[in-house]
Amino acid sequence: MMNIRIAALIVWSFTHYGLIAHGKDTASVERIGDDIRYLASDELEGRGPQTKGLELAAQRIEKVYTDAKLIGKGDGGNYRQPFEIPLDVKVMDDVTRLAFETSSGKVELEPGEDFQPLAAGGSGEAKAELFFVGYGIDAPDLNYSDYKDIDVEGKVVVMIRREPQQDNEASVFDGKRTSQHSFIRTKIDAAKKAKVAGIVMVNDPHSTHEKADELTRPTGFGSQGADIPFFHMTKESLNELLANHPVKAGSKELVTVKEIADHIDSDLKPLSQSLSISAELSSKFVEVSTEVSNIIGILEGEGPLAEETIVVGAHYDHLGMGPFGSRRPNERAVHNGADDNATGTAAVMELARRLSGSQLKRRIVFIGFTAEERGILGSNYYLENPVIPLDQTVAMINFDMIGMYGKQGITLGGANTAKEYPDMLAEASEGGDFNIKQSQSVGGSDHAGFYRKGIPIMFFHTGLTDLYHTPDDDFETIDVEGAATTIDLAERVIRQIADLPERPTFTQATPRRRGGMVYVGITLDFDDSIKGIGIQQVAPESPAAKAGLQPGDVIVKISEAEVNSPQDLPGILRQRKPGDKIDVTVKRGDKEVKLEVTLSGPPRNG
């Protein structure tokens, strides 16, 4: 008889890791659990670019493809599709400099200790008068502008980070909430509009009074240069300059950043003025690239529909040790990415195992995408360099974060992107106890580019949690049996698509409608490689449609504010109300088009 203590330990192990599946193929659940556990282990170092773990993950996928006897289209028939990605920018220390000529002599600051050049500005140099411009805000609609009635063309400006009156609920800058005028890009745009030669910024005293005055890392505000040298300097360094070159407010002389900020907060009047100091600065950044690979295996179809292709994909990369993409950028730790996206990768591998012995009418292309966390670069590269022509690709099934089924069920995106999908999904769900919520949103993972190409998609996802993009996204948190349930449903769906007598009929998904703010009527494209706000869909009869916005447009400016990513939009719209008119400038092909949008309230259903 088995030792009771050993038996209890075995049962605990299987239940703890979610491996006892009622009415399921236990071996399949164990395989899925083993795959997720391995991919999310510390040994794989968070599967970030240039880690050995990313390579080990690729090898794990290749081993499954080999055992499943999938065909490779890479060099020599391997499974790799290599490409280069920009990894980081490197500061060229030998040309990095920030110095000031003051009334008491020259002050040379130490890079990395007293200041940090920022890649958001880019490479450049300047030697000019230093001009204080408050918070560097130009908001005439709020009756506040640090640039009003001053000429700073060709000068170096020094400014305070964020915005005035941050602790005042009655502040015109959206109360205690962060408004668009705090955004670094908004400050850069205002400075460029004023034709300054360079920018120096210090931390605001309000948000750092209980914290160390830390300098931002070189890529802390992004790596896309704005063609203007931009430096982050310590408050202590500026205070030392102010001791002999104070900011004057009437008869008062303000000699610290805190005194200046308190004074502006008190009456919300700018204190822009020359500091009678000469500044000299220079910076240079070079891009660092690395090679990564999509891992692609092909299961050929049989019969007259064999050339038609279903892509089954998931990204296998994650964030490494951070800080890139981490929601805890100051915490240097392995981000194991168990849910994001060891679970999705395990789904692709398990489906390769299950389907490899089948005689399917259509070809299946299994893809482990890489560099999704860097801006869905892997899937975008595949779309430009497909191993099977896109006109033969009839559907794309994507898995991204399927490890929380027990808490949230399956959120299925894109189930309305083919005319046949609703009936097909109902049939696939029959006889199974599946918890499915259909999302009207397409979503922004690796499937999004396929959708833009007119290919029907399905996106399997089990929702976000507080573990997302943190070091706590570990294997122990994963509902393995629930992931297996999600894969079971996906297998049924894939087999049904493979058996359809005709290829699925692509349809535009209905854009998701949001309450709680003004309504524009667009679905955003969350492709991080786009500078601006990409428009994926435009709702019929919406303010956007009436103004003439089109899918594929990229919003680059709203009124006078330049926009760089979808994250800029909520702060801008929060300042507006139904009935307001806004000028929206979009890139359409190689042209810029300016359109007037009249905002409305959220539409009512029914």
Image (cartoon, rainbow, N blue to C red):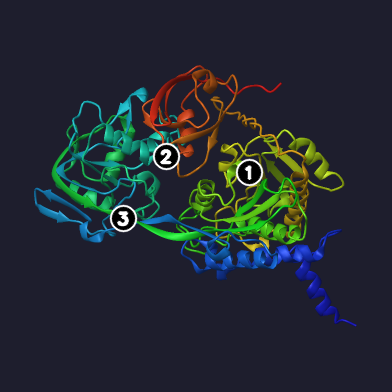
* Residue designated by label 1: 392
Tell me what residue is drawn at x 43 percent, y 36 percent: 532
Q: Position of residue 354 (x, y in %)?
A: 75, 59
Residue 259 sits in quarter: top left
Q: Is residue 77 visible?
A: yes
Of the image marks 1 and 2, the number of the one nearer the N terminus:
1
User: Is 208 on the left or on the right of 599, as rendered?
Assistant: left
Residue 248 sits in quarter: top left
User: Is 545 on the left or on the right of 63, as rendered?
Assistant: left
Depth check, front residue: 70 or 562: 70
Specify few, some or many for label 3: CA neighbours under 10 Å numbering under 14, 14-19, or 20 or more.
few
Q: Are marks 3 and 2 in contact (CB under 8 Å)?
A: no
Q: Position of residue 145 (x, y in %)?
A: 29, 28
Q: Amino acid at mark 1?
A: Gln
Of the image marks 3 and 1, the number of the one nearer the N terminus:
3
Query: Disc 3 versus disc 1: distance between alpha carbons?
Result: 40 Å
**Label for residue 374?**
none
* Residue designated by label 2: 531
User: Is 567 on the left or on the right of 163, as rendered?
Assistant: right
Mark nearest the camera among 3 and 1 is 1
As drawn, 548 above or below 437: above
Circle 2 SS class? loop
Q: Amino acid at mark 3?
A: Val
* Residue designated by label 3: 286
Farthest-out residue, right: 1
As drawn, 130 above or below 60: above
Q: Position of residue 342 (x, y in %)?
A: 62, 59
Q: Quadrant of the N terminus?
A: bottom right
Of the image marks 3 and 2, the number of the one nearer the N terminus:
3
